[in-house]
Image (spheres, rainbow, N blue to C red):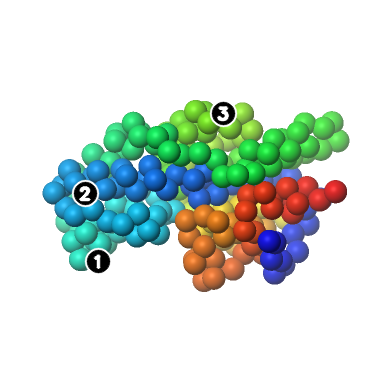
C-alpha cells in the first residue's frame, strides 16, 4: 500500500538517497545476535530481539548505550563509560564477522534498485543512487559489496563518514553536492524518524518504509509518502 501525504514529483527526481538497515536490507537478526553476544561477554542478561531492533537506526554508539541501559535497568546516558568502551570494542569486530549470517535485501529491493539504475543509464536521464546510513561506513560498504548491490550506488556514506549523523543534514547535503542536484530533485528513503528528519533538515522529499525497524517512529515524524513494501518503490518512483 502507498499512502501519500504530500505528492512526490517522481518524474523530476535525480538523486535517490537510501538508508540501509530496515530499508534496503533486513539485518535484524545479525544485529540482535551481535548485541546479545556483547551482553553475554559483559556477563549481562540478553534482550529480546524485538527490544534490540527498536534501538537500531541511530548508529552503533546509541544502539549499545540503549541496549546496555535496558540490560542494567538504567538510562542510556547513565551507562558507565568504561563499560560502554568494552561493549563497543567487542561489538564492532564481532558484528563484522557475523553481519552476513542472516542479512538479506528485502523482497523487491533489488528489482527497484536495478530499475532505477537502468533508468539512470539512459542518455537523456540524470538519476543517481546513493546510501546515507548511520551504520559504520566499513560495515555498510562490506555488506553492499557482499550482496552485490554496491554497483548501484554513487557513494555509500555511513554514520562515521562525517562528524555528524542523521538527522543532521551534513551527509545528505554532501551527496547532493557530489551529484550536482538540488533538494527539490532529491528523495530520502528510510524507515525511521531520523531518515525523515534528515530529509526535512536538508529540504528534500521523504519516503518512509513501514516494513523496517522503526515504523512506529514514522508516526512521530510523518514522511511525504509511506509504503508497506520495497516493491512499492517501483510503482511510486517509476510510474508508467
Q: Position of residue 157 (x, y in %)?
A: 51, 40
In the orientation shown, which residue stands out farthest toward the left? 43
Residue 126 lies, in percent from the top left, at: 77, 38
Coordinates of residue 131 in the picture (x, y in percent)? 56, 42
Please give the name of the residue rendered at 61% of the width and 29% of the height, measured from the top-left corner.
151
Mark closer to the observer (1, 3): 3
Q: Residue at x 13, y 49 (%)?
A: 43
Q: Are marks 2 and 1 in contact (CB under 8 Å)?
A: no
Image position of 145 with respect to 61: above or below:
above
Residue at mark 2: 39
On the rendered structure, is 220 left or right of 80? Answer: right
From where the camera sits, is residue 182 visible?
A: no
Per the image, the residue denoted by label 1 is: 75
Mark 3 highlights which residue? 148
Classify mark 2: helix, strand or loop.
helix
- Which of the two discs, 1 and 3, labels the residue nearer the N terminus? 1
Q: Are circles 1 and 3 on residues that touch, CB within 8 Å?
A: no
Above or below, 2 against 238 in this view is below
**Could you tell me which residue is drawn at 81 percent across and 51 percent down?**
239
Give the mark, 2 or 1, whose residue is nearer the N terminus. Answer: 2
Q: Residue 125 at x, y = what percent?
A: 81, 38
Earlier in the chain: of badge 3 and badge 2, it is 2
Q: Residues within 10 Å of mark 2 (few under 14, many from 20)?
A: many
Tag 3 and tag 2, C-beta contact below 8 Å: no
Label 1 secondary element: loop
CA gap, disc 3 and disc 2: 32 Å
Query: Which image quadrant: the N terminus?
Result: bottom right
Residue 114 visible in the shown view: yes
Q: Could you classify mark 3 by the number of other residues whose Cα lies within 10 Å: few (under 14), some (14-19), or many (20 or more)? A: few
Front in this rendered view, residue 229 or 90: 229
Give the Cα distance between marks 1 and 3. Answer: 39 Å
Q: CA distance from mark 2 to mark 1?
A: 16 Å
Amino acid at each position: 500500500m502507498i499512502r501519500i501525504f504530500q505528492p512526490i514529483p517522481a518524474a523530476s527526481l535525480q538523486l535517490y538517497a537510501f538508508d540501509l538497515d530496515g530499508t534496503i536490507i533486513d539485518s535484524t537478526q545479525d544485529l540482535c545476535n551481535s548485541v546479545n553476544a556483547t551482553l553475554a561477554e559483559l556477563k549481562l542478561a540478553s534482550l529480546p530481539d524485538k527490544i534490540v531492533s527498536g534501538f537500531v537506526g541511530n548508529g552503533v554508539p546509541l544502539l549499545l548505550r540503549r541496549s546496555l541501559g535496558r540490560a542494567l535497568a538504567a538510562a542510556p546516558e547513565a551507562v558507565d563509560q568504561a563499560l560502554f568502551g568494552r561493549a563497543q570494542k567487542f561489538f564492532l569486530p564481532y558484528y563484522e564477522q557475523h553481519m552476513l549470517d542472516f542479512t538479506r535485501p528485502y523482497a523487491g529491493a533489488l528489482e527497484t534498485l536495478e530499475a532505477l539504475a537502468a533508468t539512470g543509464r539512459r542518455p537523456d536521464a540524470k538519476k543517481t543512487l546513493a546510501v546515507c546510513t548511520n551504520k559504520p561506513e566499513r560495515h555498510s560498504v562490506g555488506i553492499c559489496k557482499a550482496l552485490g548491490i554496491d554497483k548501484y550506488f554513487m557513494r555509500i556514506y555511513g554514520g562515521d563518514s562525517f562528524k555528524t549523523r542523521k538527522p543532521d543534514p551534513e551527509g545528505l547535503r554532501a551527496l547532493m553536492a557530489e551529484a550536482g542536484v538540488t533538494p527539490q530533485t532529491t528523495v530520502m528513503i528510510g524507515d525511521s524518524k531520523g531518515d525523515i528528519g534528515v530529509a526535512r533538515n536538508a529540504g528534500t522529499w521523504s519516503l518512509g518504509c513501514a516494513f523496517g525497524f522503526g515504523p512506529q517512529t514514522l508516526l512521530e515524524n510523518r514522511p511525504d509518502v509511506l509504503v508497506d513494501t520495497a516493491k512499492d518503490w517501483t510503482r511510486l518512483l517509476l510510474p508508467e
